[in-house]
Image (tube, grey):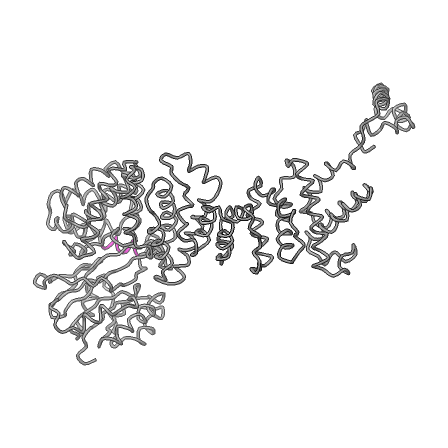
Amino acid sequence: MANPVLSIGIIFRDDIRCIERCLKALQPLRDAVPCQLVMADTGSVDGSRAVAEQYADEIFDFPWINDFAAARNAVIDRCTGEWYLSVDTDEYLDEDVSELAAFLLDPSQPFQLARVTIRNYRNYEMEGSYADFFTLRMLRLSTGARYQGTIHEAWTGLENAGNPIQLNRTIFHHDGYVNMGENREKLQRNMSLLREKMRTEPTNLLIRLQVIESGFQEPDYLDQLKKAISLVKRKKAGWKIFGPPIFRHAVSIAQDRKLSEFQKWAEQAEDWFPESYFTRIDVKARLVLNCYDQKDYSGCIRHGQALLEAYADYRAGRGDLNCQVCSTLQLASPYHEQTLRMCMANACLEEQQTAEARALLEEMEYSVLDKGQVENLTKTLCSLHSRSDEDTAPLIRAVWEGLTEAAPSEERAEGRRLVFLVFGSAAFTPAYLQDEKGKPHYQRPAYSLFAPLAWDNGLGAAAAILETEDPSKMEALLRGVEKWAELPFPALRRAIEAGVSFPLPDRPLGIEVLDELAKRLAGDWGHFLPLVRKTAETDFTRNWQSLSWMRALILAAVQNCSWKTVDPKDGLEVARLFAAVEDVFLPRCYCPELLTAEALTALPPVHRFGWHCAQAFAALEDGDAAGYARFLREGLASCENMKALTAFLTEHTPELQAPPADPELLELAEKVREMLALYPAEDPAAMAIRASAVYQRVAHLIEGGPA
């Protein structure tokens, strides 16, 4: 291409997993700016070359000589653009290229260098935790800059290029470090090259830093780390540049591995390199987390305040950002900032600094949170609301709007929304309510936090229902519920107990929804059984909705009743009500031909048992105890899940119990036992006694069988 504005340089080898994703993502930039794409193949055999040929303006072979800098410089030598941009195949340019394109097409801008954001992910789905760092990836070719470094190559020759511009909205998404620890072949290759370099240049701090970054699985890793620290303290060449990231790694490793040197190394980093972002962000963040873990909440807040100032300076481009030429920051991303803000907010709560906690939460970027962070945020919000009188209404509204913002996608937003609802619903449970009242500084139930969201989601509707005494308002709130599964069940129970007719008139619900609601209500048996009674007292046969709801309630009662321990009176009431409801429901739902003993197999098992149960109680009303028992046995044969209920009815139905024994029979049985005790069991005399008419009269008292 003649006179391109930008040359894009890529080296690759066997990158079929990601190379096309990378090259496709460059197309919006190539459409917006005259570009040249130059690629060097260092020995691909997996089909990557064929993919690259579809996109590259120039592609050439570069025999691999174990030197990344040499390969990159070979690409630069073939570039003719005004600007040069280095890209790796395991990263892709964000779809928003407006900032980068505008910069390149502005002939008046004075900069020679430009930084972009590299966003490192922990998984190939590129979800959850990530680390952002600004790095120098683009420069004018007229600077004459070159790469140096066999493994972790870096720019050289930029002494007179001036300060770089920071392109904050130009992001490259990168997944090349995923499973890095499992890529033993690559790590061993790197370490072999680095150890050879270290042998010939033992005081080279760049090589020492690269050993620390690549050799975390090596058995002598801690020794190498301590030797690097020693070289920094001896102020070997480059100590001011490489010392901060070396100390940052030392502090990180010390915290992760619980080394005793953690505090010492952190203090030395702050003493030696107080202005470096490796100290101000990475080391400080570790101190914040360590203080919180140690319950040193005031220390957590103190270090956290300094950390937030560092984040603000870093985002604004103030201070020395060239530090990342030799290494990358670990905890500088917006993702990590949100985690540390929540940590500080919880520390503030422990110190009763509730206004400060609220301010920290208000300044968060909710749309960048992952599911784990949303869980922690929801719990922190509940704690703030429960333990203070802060006005949390504006905060909870802002949180909801931020979590449901379609960023970076609708799918991610939906994931955040669901986590918020799931963990928010915990605040409505009886166990949570009881527990929070026993905590220090309790002022109000956490669930009331969600009341400002009354018309946005089930949590808000539930909170508003529990906060009002007005049944008409309760009904209006229930009418606004779109997803019943997201409504905490105590609110529905409260509305029904207050007299709200449910299901709502003109708001029909499917039988599966009614079943699920009843099942959730049944989890609190002490409140559920009175609700079932209350519903049974209404005319539940008036329409399909009311009958379906009664059916759902009684089925949930039967399935959730603890039949072995339930009060017999309550158990019999539930069983009789089940039979009564089934006796009404089945003829309305199934044709008469199916409701016969011969055709019952066409019904679901629970309704087969329901039919038998209804027949059993009808027989009992007619005084036919034997028929009652027979229908129960047949019902159990058709639905084995009803074994506990059948056993309960067998044991607690008075008509099935044997009458008290006649005292004369008891006396006769005792005499027969005494006679039998005189002979062995197989003795003819004993056999004659057992065959006698007298024995037959008292056999049930001796053997324990039925009378």
Residue pushed farthest left? 160
Q: Is residue 440 magenta?
A: no
From the viewer's side, name the closer residue of 299 and 350.
350
Residue depicted at 19% across the width and 47% down the height: 280
Where does the image place residue 635, in percent across and percent down from the top left? 74, 48
Residue depicted at 88% across the width and 28% down the height: 697
Query: Residue 366 vs residue 467: left or right?
Result: left
Q: Quadrant of residue 16?
A: bottom left
Q: Is residue 395 above or below residue 657?
A: below
Query: Residue 253 vs residue 693: left or right?
Result: left
Q: Quadrant of residue 655?
A: top right
From the viewer's side, name the closer residue of 115 and 648.
648
Where does the image place residue 402, in percent across and percent down from the top left? 34, 57
Q: Which residues are magenta?
A: 186-193
Where does the image place residue 175, in percent across and percent down from the top left? 32, 59
Q: Is residue 118 above or below residue 376?
A: below
Q: Quadrant of the N terminus?
A: bottom left
From the viewer's side, name the closer residue of 428 and 373.
428
Where does the image place residue 274, in percent across and percent down from the top left? 14, 45
Q: Is residue 404 above or below residue 108?
A: above
Q: Quadrant of the C terminus?
A: top right
Q: Quadrant of residue 165?
A: bottom left
Dominant secondary structure (helix, strand or loop) of the stretch shown in magenta: helix
Query: Residue 143 vs residue 420: left or right?
Result: left
